[in-house]
Image (cartoon, rainbow, N blue to C red):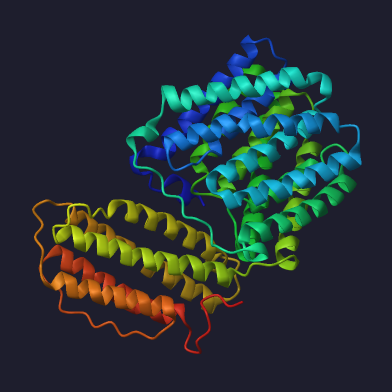
Amino acid sequence: MLKRVFMAPDPGRIRLRFAARAVLGIGLAVVVCGLAGHSLTGAVTGGLAALLALFTVTDATVRGQAVTTALLPVVGLPVLAAAAVLHDHPVARDLTFLAVVGLGVYARRWGPRGHSLGVFAFMTYFVAQFLHARTAQLPELYASVLLSVLAAAAVRFGLWCYERRLPPAVVPAPPAGTGLARVTTRQAVQATAGAGFALVVGQLLSGERWYWAVGATWWVFVNTTSRGETLVRGFRRVLGTVIGIGLALFVAVPAHGDGPVTALVVAVAVFGIFYTAAVSYTWMMLWVTVLAAMLYGLLGVLTPGLLALRAVETAVGALGAVLAVAFVLPVTTHSVTDTWIQRALRCVHACTAQAAARLAGTADADPAPVVAELEQLLARVRLSVAPLVHPLNPMLGRKRRARRVLALLDDCAREIRGLVAVAADPEASHDARLAAACWRVEAAVEALTGGRDIAVRTSPAGTEPALAHLHGLERALAELAAPLRAPSGSPLVGA
């Protein structure tokens, strides 16, 4: 876990800039709220709104990100009003919370924008429970949200918009389907059921902090699709929370809400959340727990007992998510993994075709965007296969096969990157053997995605770099056939 965070590659220092900009944007939002004369509750609300505006908006283009950021208050303010109005009506409050959960997850069918708006709506309702918001506070809270989103936008799109110098991000579309066959629809039902379990059990444990359990269920469902992914994410959430509580006992409790110390630790925690989010969910949850502990210390209610309650409520929320994906419209790990692997393989073929066309002199052939898509698809494959390669997975045979598949897909990606680098060289010449090699790659991909046996025959490696990469790609594809299908014909992960 330490190696994953501190030795993970950060091309272009994107994660570093992402985290540093978050500290700057959230800090500016809190300062603006303070200058506006807002109370501590307003400043906390504003800081969390800025955090969400900087963290959850992931549209492919800067223009799309700006539009989504502008829409955040449109969904957040009505939800905030509903939470405040229903604060003293527990049944209506709880039913509305579950409706927000279901609609927030269902909104993911509309891609990154739907996901961002769904998260913002949920977290706005969650924050209202966290701060016990009442109707009399709504004008101040509205102002805090609006000012903070504006401050975050000013930093993101004005002061430090490093995305303008980067190619548009590639966001793979979720697996298609209609009705209950659509993964996002099934997840909406699952999340609502899991949140209902967490809400009931969480209230039995604590009438004041029950929303922690609902929040844990919600976040376990974020960026997961299958039963196995949810199980692993739930485990990591609990682990990160427990480790974070241990750290908070040595940092947050002794601080007693001291202003300068709290500001420093909060800044470090925010940086940690943004810097580790892409590489380790456990580490991200560690920093989220420290941040929550510091905020409770600032509000004057932090005790070791409260931290212990958070651990229990988090476990209840994770259990709710696991039960929901296991028994409510389950999505098997096999079906999801197979879908992402097939999409990655088809993208390998598309990359090869574009690179070969570029080498052949086709002016408008550009493999770079397809390579970016391949990297995103491989990230999704790793996420879906994570349950199989987890250290606690007792199925050693499937674990070995899954690791072999990941290694060979990484080999494919490495050869593709090398091929694209050669194609980008204006002095690279076209070799007649490239066409034959590309046809063999296409045949191999079609065989793998169609479930047919393949026997890729590679030519002796030539001295030309492009041919060398194509032959390496052929070998990797040929070797993929075995781990993707067991000798009996069973799938990689089973049902």
Q: Position of residue 418 (x, y in %)?
A: 23, 59
Left-right relation of 392 to 379: right
Q: Nearer the viewer, residue 34 or 268?
A: 34
Q: Nearer the viewer, residue 273 or 48?
A: 48
**Occupied quadrant, residue 293:** top right
> Which residue is located at x 68 percent, y 29 percent?
294
Q: Position of residue 395 (x, y in %)?
A: 58, 76
Q: Position of residue 430 (x, y in %)?
A: 10, 63
Is residue 27 at all visible to an observer of this figure? no
Relative vertical location of residue 132 with respect to residue 198 in this rendering, above or below: above
Q: Position of residue 388 (x, y in %)?
A: 55, 69
**Occupied quadrant, residue 471:** bottom left
Q: How many marks?
A: 0
Is residue 405 at all visible to an observer of this figure? yes
Of the 4 image quadrants, the one containing the C terminus is: bottom right
Q: Nearer the viewer, residue 278 or 393?
A: 278
> Which residue is located at x 66 percent, y 20 percent?
144
Q: Nearer the viewer, residue 457 or 265?
A: 457
Relative vertical location of residue 342 with respect to residue 6 in this rendering, above or below: below
Left-right relation of 230 to 378: right
> Which residue is located at x 45 percent, y 57 percent?
379
Left-right relation of 399 to 438: right
**Occupied quadrant, residue 50:** top right
Residue farthest along the bottom direction in this orientation: 488
